[in-house]
Image: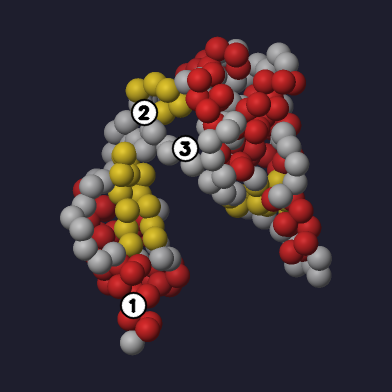
Amino acid sequence: MIDRLPDDGWRALDILEISVYQNAGLSKDIINAARRKGDKFGTEVQISSYPKFRHTFSLHKAQTTELVEDIWTACKMANVWGCHCVRGDHIFRCPQSIYVPQLTGGNMTDEGFAIASTPDVRDRLLAFLNGSGPLHSCANCVGSCGKQFNQTGLPRKSWKDDLQAPMEDIVDYALLARSKTEMQLIDDCRTPERKMRGLSATIARNFKKLL
């Protein structure tokens, strides 16, 4: 999709992060073309590799409400990193709440907020995004505290088989305990590309605005 992003999209972005997965087949030509576009439009292009993943979903609900509460409290995606996302005409607290309902017999929009042009949409949206939890999806999701494993590719027909492990078996309990009290844990599956020190495109663009 990067190579199809229109110029207006580049102009609107301060930072674009490209996630590189070993088996995704993203070519260096596309990455280099994105860098050139970033230089042209003053958008900082960041490259990050993900050699490791963490377990996320289980088709089997957690056996205790205490575990669900702990996972919600510790979840950085929903409560710290601001991983809200839009799908169709709905916005979601986190990407996981799009997929869990579909994996467990529900509908994609079950935990979404319907975007509509109404006078009170701002207040209702803020109430939705800042609402208390856990979400229903948290019963089948370990959030940001799943056990870590090396990245691998699975055939699509094997995806559901990979979700058969019980929730209790895929939680990283040490990380869960830390995440409940430490707000600024880094995403240790993410490896940012090292680059030479210099003026970033974002800083350069903001500096130009001051001239």
**How far across and how far down the image is residue 34, in percent?**
29, 59
Is 38 positioned to the left or the right of 157 in the image? left
The nearer-to-camera label among 3 and 2 is 3
Dot 2 surroundings within 10 Å: few (below 14), some, or many (20 or more)? some
Q: Which residue is mark 2?
A: 52
At x 36%, y 44%, the residue is 19
Which of the numbered marks, if any, corresponds to residue 207? 1
C-alpha span from label 3 to label 1:
31 Å
Provide the secondary structure element on which disc 2 rests.
strand
Tell which of 57 and 79 is nearer to you. 79
Visible residue check, residue 29:
no
Q: Are marks 3 and 1 in contact (CB under 8 Å)?
A: no
At x 43%, y 37%, the residue is 187
Looking at the rendering, which quadrant does residue 186 occupy? top left
Provide the secondary structure element on which disc 1 rests.
helix
C-alpha span from label 2 to label 1:
37 Å
In the rendered image of this protein, does residue 30 appear above or below residue 24?
Answer: below
The first of marks 3 and 1 along the sequence is 3
**How far across and how far down the image is residue 173, in percent?**
54, 18
Q: Which residue is mark 3?
A: 185
Colouring convention used in this rendered image of the protein: secondary structure
Visible residue check, residue 59:
yes
The first of marks 2 and 1 along the sequence is 2
Amino acid type at mark 2: Lys
The nearer-to-camera label among 2 and 1 is 1
C-alpha span from label 3 to label 2:
16 Å
